Amino acid sequence: MRAQGRSQTFILGTWVICAVLLTLAVVVGAGPLASSAPETISLPLAFTAGAVLASLADTLMPGAYEKGGPTVALSTAAGFVLSYVLATV
């Protein structure tokens, strides 16, 4: 963010807002939604998964692919397959 010309106040403000929102999400998830039916939390979980994938694709993967090449793509796919297998077993 600094390299893009953002001020110190903007950078710290952005991270503080993210920390507050994440804390709120954890409290709501561990409290009122902890005993919810799977159908109730399926939409928030799908949204969260999409946000994580978008973040990975936009920020982390281009740099990793630039430095690691095709091996990074294969290891990423293997990681997704492994996580799916572990989640369904």
Image: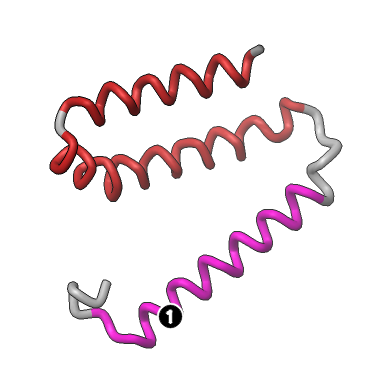
Q: Amino acid at mark 1?
A: Leu
| Residue in the foreground of this view, choosing between 70 and 53 | 70
What residue is at 26 percent from the left and 41 percent from the top? 61
What residue is at 61 percent from the left and 34 percent from the top? 43
In the image, residue 37 above or below residue 22: above
Q: Which residues are magenta?
A: 6-30
Q: Give the dominant element type of the magenta stretch: helix, strand or loop.
A: helix
Q: Does the magenta portion include 72?
A: no
Q: Does the magenta portion include 23?
A: yes
Q: Position of residue 72 (x, y in %)?
A: 25, 31
**Helix, strand or loop under label 1:** helix
| Residue in the foreground of this view, choosing between 31 and 65 | 65
Q: Position of residue 31 (x, y in %)?
A: 83, 51
In the picture, measured across the screen, residue 85 lies left or right of residue 42, that is: left
In the image, residue 62 above or below residue 75: below
In the image, residue 55 above or below residue 70: below
Instruction: Identify residue for label 1.
Output: 12
In the picture, measured across the screen, residue 8 lies left or right of residue 12, that is: left
Q: Quadrant of residue 27?
A: bottom right
Q: Position of residue 63 (x, y in %)?
A: 20, 47
In the picture, measured across the screen, residue 4 lies left or right of residue 53, that is: left
| Residue in the foreground of this view, choosing between 76 and 1 | 76
Q: Position of residue 23 (x, y in %)?
A: 66, 63
